[in-house]
Amino acid sequence: QVQLVESGGGSVQAGGSLSLSCVASGYLDSKYVMAWFRQAPGKEREGVAIFYRDASTTYKDSVKGRFTISKDNAKNTLYLQMNSLKPEDTAMYYCAADPRRLPDMADFGTVPGTLWGQGTQVTVSS
């Protein structure tokens, strides 16, 4: 069973940067579409960014221009570069892999076979 392991979280001041990584242990079929989600205390989990098979990307409106999702297939690793961080970005960040070709933010990860990591905490202080 492939596992997704996130790292790179931490505590920063507003305006700072963090870089998250998600490594897939074992072989992860190239059919999977990868994404970053986050969940703040008392709030529902929300999609942050998706990286599709053709290397196209989509972002949550509030992170556009500040966050960049990327993927290194050779290293089996998904990244999320987060710049100009704001206190409202504080959350647990999760990596996910959806087996469908074109999942969108609304239904990403809602099908059997979806993989989720354990999460990495990001805290932004004002």
Image (cartoon, rainbow, N blue to C red):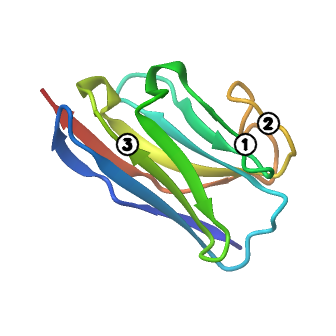
Crowding near pointer 3: few (<14 within 10 Å), some, many (20+)?
Answer: many
Residue 60 sits above or below residue 103 on the image: above
Q: Quadrant of residue 57?
A: top right
- The x, y position of residue 12, in whole percent, is 17, 43
- The x, y position of residue 89, in whole percent, is 33, 30
The residue shown at (63%, 71%) is 76
In this rendering, the label closer to the viewer, 1 or 2: 1
Amino acid at circle 2: Pro
The residue shown at (45%, 27%) is 63
- The x, y position of residue 112, in whole percent, is 82, 48
Crowding near pointer 1: few (<14 within 10 Å), some, many (20+)?
Answer: few
Which quadrant: the C terminus? top left
In three-dimensional space, the C-alpha distance between marks 3 and 1, rounded to whole angstroms, equals: 18 Å
Q: Which residue is mark 1?
A: 56
Amino acid at circle 1: Ser
Q: Which residue is mark 3?
A: 82
Amino acid at circle 3: Met
Which of the marked residues, 3 or 1, is nearer the chain's N terminus?
A: 1
Which of the marked residues, 2 or 3, is nearer the chain's N terminus?
A: 3
Residue 12 sits above or below residue 79 on the image: above
Give yes or no for contact between labels 2 and 3 (Cβ–Cβ under 8 Å).
no
Of residue 100 and residue 119, the one placed in the foreground of this image is 100
Q: Which residue is mark 2?
A: 103
- The x, y position of residue 78, in whole percent, is 56, 59
In the image, taking residue 30 as reference, residue 94 lies left or right, namely left
In three-dimensional space, the C-alpha distance between marks 1 and 2, rounded to whole angstroms, equals: 12 Å
In this rendering, the label closer to the viewer, 2 or 3: 3
